[in-house]
Image (tube, grey):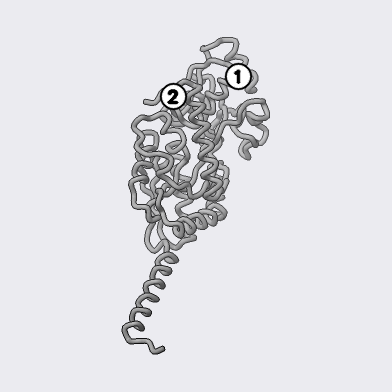
Amino acid sequence: MQTSPMQTLLTAALGLALAGTAMAQEAFPSKAVTVIVPFQAGQGVDVMARALAVELARVTGQAFPVVNREGAAATIGFAALASSKPDGYTISISPNTPLTVAPHLLKSVTYTYEAFIPVCQSFENVMAVFVGPGSPHKTLKELLAAAQADPGKVNWATTGIGSVPHLSGAALMQSAKLEATHVPFRGEPQILQQLLANEITFAAASVSGMVGKGVRPLAVFSEQRHAAFPDVPTLVELGFPPGVPGLNGVFAPRGTPEPVLVVLEKACADATASEGFRTSAGRLHQRVAYLGRRDFDRRLRNDYDEKARLIKSLNLKAE
C-alpha cells in the first residue's frame, strides 16, 4: 500500500514530537535549579546545604544556586516551595522540622505534608546533652539526679520550642519523670556563651555546633555513638528514648514529573557519596546518611506521627 505525502509528513512530525519529548525528559536539568534553604546563611544547616548543592551541580552539569528564605520556623521557605512550579527547577534542601514539626505547632502553616515529595535524605544532624566546663556533673546519671533532688531548679537550653533538640530533651525529661526549666535561645552561639559561663545547667544542642568549643557532652541523642565523641554513651545505652536527629534532605513540590524525580534522586545519591560532600560533613561533624525517595518518605511520615504524639503529650499548644 502506497503512503501519501501527507501521511509521510504526519508520521515524520509525530516522530519528531516523540523524540523531542524524550530529549526534553533526558535533558533535565537543562538550566539552573534554584535551591531554597529555609534558614539563615552561615548556619550549619546552610553550610551543609551549600556543600550538597555544589556536588549536585557537579554531577548534573548545571548550577544549583542557593536562596535563603528564613523565618517563621523555616515555614516561609517551605511555603515558597509549595507554591513553586513543580518542574524540578525549584527544590529545597532542609531539615525535616518545617514538614514534620511546624504543622503541629504553628497555626500559620499554609501547607500540608502532601504538598511535597521528599526526594532523598542526605545527612543527620545529631544532638547531645552538653554541660559547661565548670559543671559538677560528669555523667547524665549525675545530672538527672541533681534535677530530681531539686525539681524545677535545674534549667536547660535549646534553640527554641518545637526544635529537634527541644523535643528530644523534653522526651528525656518526660521519660525520666523530671521537671526542669526550659530556656529557649535564638541560636547555638548564645547557648554556648551561657554554658561556658555556667549560667545554665545543661543544653540539648547539635554536636556540630558544640564540638571543640570547650563544653562537655554527657550523652548523644542517637542509637549509635557519634564519631566526634566515641567515648560518650547514647541515650539508648542509658535506657532512654534515642530522640530523632535533624533529618536533612532534598524536597520537591508535589506534581514534579517522575522522570525529573528519578534524575534528582540519582544526583542526590551521587552527591552524598562524593568525597567533597563527605569531607564537608566530616569537617562539620555531620553524619552522612543517604536514603532514597521511598525510604525517606517512610521515615518522615513516621516522624510526623511521632512528633504529633510527643507534642500532644508535652501539652505544647499551636501558636
Can you tell which quarter of the image residue 33 is in? bottom left
Alpha-carbon span between mark 2 and mark 1: 21 Å
Q: For mark 2, what is the residue? A: 184
Q: Residue furthest left?
A: 6
User: Residue 92: x, y in percent?
Assistant: 41, 47
Q: Residues within 10 Å of mark 1 (few under 14, many from 20)?
A: some
Residue 207: percent from left, percent from top: 55, 35
Return the residue nearer the eye: 13 or 79: 13
Characterize the local packing of mark 2: few (<14), some (14-19) or many (20 or more) Cα atoms within 10 angstroms. some
Give the structural element (helix, strand or loop) at label 1.
loop
Quarter of the view holding residue 7:
bottom left
Q: Nearer the viewer, mark 2 or mark 1?
A: 1
Q: Is residue 113 left or right of residue 149?
A: left
At label 2, which amino acid type do we have? Pro
Which residue is painted at 52% across and 23% down in the image?
170
The furthest residue to the bottom? 2
- Any mark on residue 176, and which? 1
In the picture as drawn, the residue positioned furthest to the front comes out as 1
* Residue 184, position as x, y percentages in the image: 44, 24
Figure disc tally? 2
Q: Residue at x 44, y 38 (%)?
A: 99
| Displayed quadrant of residue 75 | top left
The quadrant of the image that shows the N terminus is bottom left
Q: Amino acid at mark 1?
A: Ala
